[in-house]
Image (tube, rainbow, N blue to C red):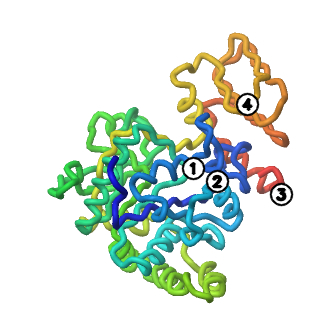
């Protein structure tokens, strides 16, 4: 087994509610704290375990919110408390990732950081490790690196990365420049991308030397960079809370794709390493059903310990957190999510609209079920 990479630190952003997975995913128990694959551990724990061979226990950190800090600690008892970065509130991915980068650079000026979301499902561990090691080598050469996923279908739910000229980097034979980012396409365009093979899914994984990442941020978002640097200066000292309370609320909310990745691509500073591993971001119940049904879409798939699910000529997904009997008779493509205080019934075709239901409940002041 290969040793962890000496100068590499893995950062796991663990934020967001996952509103398309309501009522399973809630503000206090977001999707990364759930076992959505039947593995027996949460998505967060799976991410930690996946990164251990690459970084080692002392070089994995978590960025999360105040509401989830204790639960993250319970789920990951091995994490070093000094490597848990608690946000005052969510300021999007740039603030989360670059705060960790700024603090870690002060602890180790030569550190290479990698950002890996807490709620992704990845299989083929050895291929994943091979890909990340290539991305680290690419980052060591001075590029901001991302990992693109080779599409398995013409998906419309993901952004895409157009690969460009191949790079000549030792230990990174598959690395190439990023030509451009592409927003989520319509089906016809997605089919064209799928046939082209130079388009990869954007999985939101970024690997870079901390100093390179922060220099790019300083060019594109100088005020955000300055605020994060001020917080990082105080992070390991007695004034952390006071500085956080003063500076954090004024930080700009912007995704790292827009603040760093896309501008870096325009300047020829962004590289991509294609990943051949199985990847899913479990964005809604339709993708969850596909993930765990293992091709048996004509049957009823059950997630949870409820054995009181009866089916007769039915097919769908049942996610149960109660002991109630759920009977599905003569229906196909039905998704049922049964929790103690909320019941969701939908279909794969409308699974994305769950987020709208969450917004409606919020507008009605019914946050107790969110």
- State if disc 3 and disc 4 touch (CB < 8 Å): no
Would you call the spot at circle 2 few (<14 residues within 10 Å), some (14-19), or many (20 or more)? Answer: some
Q: Is residue 255 above or below residue 234?
A: above
Judged by depth in the image, the label closer to the viewer, 3 or 2, is 2
User: Which residue in the protein does label 2 denote?
Assistant: 75
- Spatial CA span between label 3 and label 1: 33 Å
- Front residue of this view, candidates 238 and 143: 238
Residue carrying label 4: 305
Mark 4 and mark 2: span between their CA atoms? 20 Å
Which residue lies under the disc numbered 3?
365
Question: Mark 1: which secondary structure?
Answer: helix
- Left or right: where 341 falls relative to 152: right
Mark nearer the N terminus (1 vs 4): 1
State the residue position of label 1. 45
Q: Residue at x 38, y 72 (%)?
A: 210
Give the SS element for disc 4: loop
Mark 3, Cα crowd under 10 Å, few <14 / some 14-19 / many 20+, is few
Q: In the shown orientation, is residue 144 left or right of residue 102?
A: left
| Disc 3 to disc 2, C-alpha distance | 31 Å
Q: Earlier in the sequence, mark 3 or mark 1?
A: 1
Mark closer to the chain start, 4 or 2: 2
Whichever of callouts 1 and 2 sits on the residue coming sooner in the sequence is 1
The local secondary structure at tag 2 comes to helix
Give the mark toward the camera: 4 or 2: 2
Image location of residue 84, percent across then percent down: 58, 68
Q: Do the residues labelled 1 and 4 touch (CB within 8 Å)?
A: no
Give how far apart the Cα atoms at labels 1 and 4 are: 20 Å
* Residue 220 figure quarter: bottom left
**Marks 1/2: CA–CA distance:** 7 Å
Up the image or down, 186 lies above or below 370; here it is: above
Say the numbered circle drawn on residue 1.
Answer: none
């Amino acid at each position: 087994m290969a040793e962890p990479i000496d100068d590499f630190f893995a950062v796991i952003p663990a934020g967001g509610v996952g509103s398309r997975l309501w009522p399973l995913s809630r503000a206090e128990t977001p999707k990364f704290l759930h076992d959505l694959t039947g593995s027996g551990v949460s998505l967060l724990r799976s991410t930690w375990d996946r990164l251990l061979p690459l970084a080692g226990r002392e070089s994995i950190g978590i960025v999360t919110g105040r509401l989830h800090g204790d639960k993250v600690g319970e789920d990951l008892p091995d994490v070093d408390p000094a490597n848990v970065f608690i946000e005052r509130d969510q300021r999007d991915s740039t603030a989360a990732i670059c705060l960790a980068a700024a603090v870690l650079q002060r602890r180790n000026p030569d550190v290479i950081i990698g950002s890996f979301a807490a709620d992704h499902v990845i299989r083929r561990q050895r291929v994943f490790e091979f890909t990340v090691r290539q991305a680290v080598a690419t980052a060591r050469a001075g590029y901001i690196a991302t990992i693109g996923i080779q599409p398995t279908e013409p998906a419309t739910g993901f952004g895409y990365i157009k690969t460009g000229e191949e790079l000549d980097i030792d230990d990174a034979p598959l690395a190439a420049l990023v030509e451009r980012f592409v927003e989520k396409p319509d089906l016809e365009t997605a089919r064209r991308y799928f046939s082209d093979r130079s388009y990869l899914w954007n999985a939101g994984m970024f690997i870079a030397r901390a100093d390179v990442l922060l220099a790019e941020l300083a060019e594109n978002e100088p005020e955000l960079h300055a605020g994060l640097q001020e917080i990082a200066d105080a992070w390991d000292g007695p004034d952390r809370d006071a500085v956080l309370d003063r500076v954090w609320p004024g930080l700009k909310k912007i995704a790292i794709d827009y603040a760093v990745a896309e501008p870096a691509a325009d300047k020829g500073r962004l590289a991509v390493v294609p990943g051949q591993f199985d990847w899913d971001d479990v964005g809604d119940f339709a993708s969850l059903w596909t993930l765990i049904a293992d091709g048996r879409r004509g049957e009823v798939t059950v997630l949870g310990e409820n054995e009181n699910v009866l089916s007769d000529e039915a097919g769908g997904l049942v996610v149960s957190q109660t002991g109630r009997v759920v009977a599905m008779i003569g229906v196909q493509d039905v998704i049922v999510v049964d929790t103690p205080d909320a019941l969701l019934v939908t279909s794969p075709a409308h699974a994305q609209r769950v987020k709208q239901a969450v917004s409606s409940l919020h507008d009605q002041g019914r946050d107790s079920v969110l």
